[in-house]
Image (cartoon, rainbow, N blue to C red):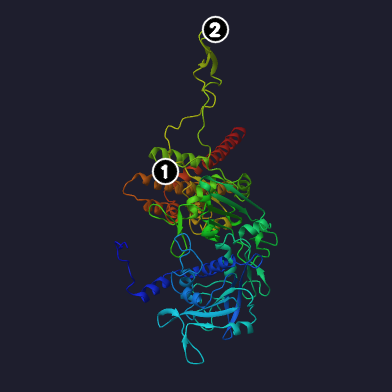
């Protein structure tokens, strides 16, 4: 026998380890863990009877959420062992498989009163309660009629009386919550956090991208927002296949990544909602997320999605567009301990975020989606002159991109053998020794060969931002710019709030300076143009100088991000006092000649009258 070269690490304080493991788990992972266990068990049931059912049961006159599933049941010994941490029944444990503690760890902080596990195996139903008492987690010891204390009890007769089918295996867990009168189907976390009536269906929708083969998930009355009746849960791809969305497309990207694009137009009966809300039991908000092994991570919806959508090439219409980035099963990522996030396995093991794939999503957008995005864009106002001015400033500051951004066009080969400035010529024509070889002879050096293009004398220089002017309250709210002047995105887009107060303040000051001109309407239009142009230029220059700070070693990336933040850009927009003088001079050149012309006309009339008198 070979002796081990180590002694294994033991646990000195079991109660402390168990408590800290449970207390640190995000409570919102409860449904994921319970539903995943139920789906995996149901997938092992005979075909045609693979079911997961969410329903309510009554406990002391209070409805409690229960999750019931078909599939192999557990006997008394297995049910007892299942309650321990790192214990799995008929599952393979591993970092990329089952941890053996997810459902227990995630559920107990929100169910200290108790989690009632029941399982039917071969017609016998056993029950155990996991709970917290006096600061310790464990199995509840229950007193039998004969006075014995036991953890697992046989409730076969009781289950039969309650109408359970004992001819097939099944398992059920009941969530009693933290309070006896807590309705766990409506308030699963006892108000912390608060949830709405569609919380359960929405959570399933935002977590499970696909269901195991043949598994049906059903929500009974009391567990969904539509009140009475039974509703089936359908994940995103199934709803897409059923026509819930107007158009979808999946694009294969490098590295085995699949990008799913969904377009969900406004609902005709209620344009403020998406069309997929019709008949839905869950939220119909568009979303972006990362799909890994049929589960969604880093889901962004609502404001969280709309503010990040420009990074994905979706500056407009994000309310109606969803993007799902699906990683291959062999991707170099792993779920973190509580499966709330994905982490990269290499390097510093950062959290995987949907935004990391923004450029990839933008590059592979189908043309129909680009057309949809353009249809939601506001009417454009040319700001090319300002962008040219900002580009010149960037070039003068010699600002380079921190990392080159790949282009979608790739490398373009130049054919030097043809073009308007060249003609073909053969060397060695008539020679006896070998084949003739074509050679290009340029006859006009002023004309470039066909296919050539202007060389980039300064590779990877930073480009001036693409300026997008937002003029409606809805557009401004979507980009979360209410009370802020602008928002800059790393992909080079600058969104500006054209309802920002400093524009109106500068306009009023200019109008006051030229209140005596004859053509007031034209003057007011000019004042608006000058005020808007001035604000755009001030914010644009603030962006340029912030980008230039990347060259300063004393400025780390966080400092640059702060300089580019909407709050910093708003300060630049507020300071119009210096730029108003330039605007006044510009308006003066436009309106003073009119006044001088009027005065000259009056003088000419006076001279004429004197001469004819």
Q: Residue at x 32, y 67 (%)?
A: 9
CB under 8 Å between discs 2 and 1: no
User: Between 213 and 478, which is closer to the camera in this rendering?
Assistant: 213
> Residue 250's spot in the image, x, y percent?
60, 49
Q: Nearer the N terminus, badge 2 or badge 1?
A: 1
Q: Residues under labels 2 and 1: Cα distance?
A: 54 Å
User: Where 602 falls versus 62 (above or below)?
Assistant: above
Question: Which type of secondary structure does the marked residue at label 2 adopt?
Answer: loop
User: Where 161 falls versus 388 (above or below)?
Assistant: below
Marking on residue 403:
1
User: Where 320 falls versus 119 (above or below)?
Assistant: above
> Residue 389's spot in the image, x, y percent?
46, 40
Q: Residue at x 40, y 40 (%)?
A: 400
Tag in front: 2 or 1: 2
Marking on residue 221:
none
Q: Residue furthest front?
A: 1
User: Between 418 and 295, which is closer to the camera in this rendering?
Assistant: 295
Q: Residues within 10 Å of mark 2 (few under 14, many from 20)?
A: few
For the C terminus, give its image quadrant: top right
Q: Which quarter of the picture shows residue 42?
A: bottom right
Question: Which type of secondary structure does the marked residue at label 1 adopt?
Answer: loop
The number of discs equals 2
Q: Which quarter of the picture shows residue 458?
A: top left
Q: Which residue is mark 2?
A: 430
> Residue 566's spot in the image, x, y percent?
45, 55
Q: Residue furthest bottom?
A: 146
């Amino acid at each position: 026998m070979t002796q081990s070269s180590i002694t294994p690490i033991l646990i000195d304080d079991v109660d402390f380890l168990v408590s800290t493991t449970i207390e640190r788990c995000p409570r919102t992972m409860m449904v994921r863990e319970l539903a995943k266990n139920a789906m995996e068990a149901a997938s092992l049931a005979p075909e045609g009877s693979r079911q997961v059912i969410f329903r309510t049961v009554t406990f002391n006159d209070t409805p409690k959420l229960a999750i019931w599933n078909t599939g192999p049941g557990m006997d008394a010994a297995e049910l007892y062992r299942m309650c321990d941490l790192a214990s799995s029944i008929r599952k393979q444990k591993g970092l990329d498989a089952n941890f053996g503690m997810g459902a227990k760890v995630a559920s107990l902080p929100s169910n200290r009163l108790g989690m009632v596990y029941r399982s039917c195996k071969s017609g016998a139903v056993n029950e155990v309660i996991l709970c917290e008492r006096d600061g310790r987690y464990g199995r509840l010891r229950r007193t039998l009629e004969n006075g014995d204390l036991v953890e697992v009890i046989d409730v076969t007769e009781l289950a039969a009386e309650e109408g359970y089918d004992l001819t097939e295996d099944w398992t059920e867990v009941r969530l009693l919550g933290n309070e006896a009168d807590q309705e766990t189907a409506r308030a699963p976390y006892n108000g912390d956090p608060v949830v709405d009536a569609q919380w359960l269906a929405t959570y399933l929708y935002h977590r499970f991208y696909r269901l195991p083969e043949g598994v049906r998930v059903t929500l009974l009355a009391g567990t969904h927002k539509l009140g009475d009746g039974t509703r089936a849960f359908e994940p995103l791809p199934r709803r897409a296949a059923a026509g819930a969305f107007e158009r979808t497309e999946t694009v294969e990207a490098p590295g085995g990544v699949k990008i799913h694009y969904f377009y969900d137009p406004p609902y005709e009966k209620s344009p403020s909602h998406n069309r997929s809300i019709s008949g839905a039991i869950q939220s119909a908000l568009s979303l972006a997320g990362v799909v890994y092994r049929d589960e969604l991570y880093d889901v962004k919806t609502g404001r969280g999605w709309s503010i990040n959508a420009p990074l994905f090439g979706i500056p407009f219409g994000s309310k109606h567009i969803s993007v799902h980035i699906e990683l291959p099963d062999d991707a170099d990522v792993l779920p973190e301990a509580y499966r709330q996030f994905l982490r990269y396995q290499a390097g510093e093991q950062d959290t995987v975020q949907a935004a990391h794939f923004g450029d990839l999503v933008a590059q592979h957008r189908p043309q129909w989606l680009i057309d949809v995005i353009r249809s939601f864009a506001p009417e454009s106002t040319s700001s090319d002159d300002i962008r040219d001015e900002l580009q010149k400033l960037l070039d003068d500051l010699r600002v380079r991109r921190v990392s080159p951004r790949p282009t979608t066009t790739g490398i373009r080969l130049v054919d030097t053998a043809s073009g308007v400035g060249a003609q073909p010529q053969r060397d060695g024509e008539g020679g006896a020794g070998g084949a003739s070889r074509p050679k290009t002879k340029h006859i006009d050096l002023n004309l470039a060969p066909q296919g050539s293009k202007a060389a980039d004398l300064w590779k990877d220089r930073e480009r001036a931002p693409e300026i997008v002017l937002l003029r409606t309250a809805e557009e401004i709210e979507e980009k979360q710019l209410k009370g802020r002047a602008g928002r800059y995105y790393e992909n080079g887009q600058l969104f500006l709030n054209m309802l920002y107060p400093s524009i109106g303040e500068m306009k009023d000051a200019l109008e006051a300076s030229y209140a005596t001109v004859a053509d007031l309407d034209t003057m007011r239009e000019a004042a608006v143009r000058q005020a808007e142009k001035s604000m755009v230029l001030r914010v644009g220059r603030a962006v340029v100088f912030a980008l230039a700070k990347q060259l300063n070693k004393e400025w780390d990336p966080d400092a640059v991000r702060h300089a580019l933040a909407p709050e910093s850009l708003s300060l630049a927009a507020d300071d119009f006092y210096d730029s108003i003088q330039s605007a006044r001079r510009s308006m003066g050149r436009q309106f003073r000649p009119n006044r001088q012309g009027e005065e000259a006309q009056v003088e000419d009339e006076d001279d004429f009258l004197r001469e004819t008198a």
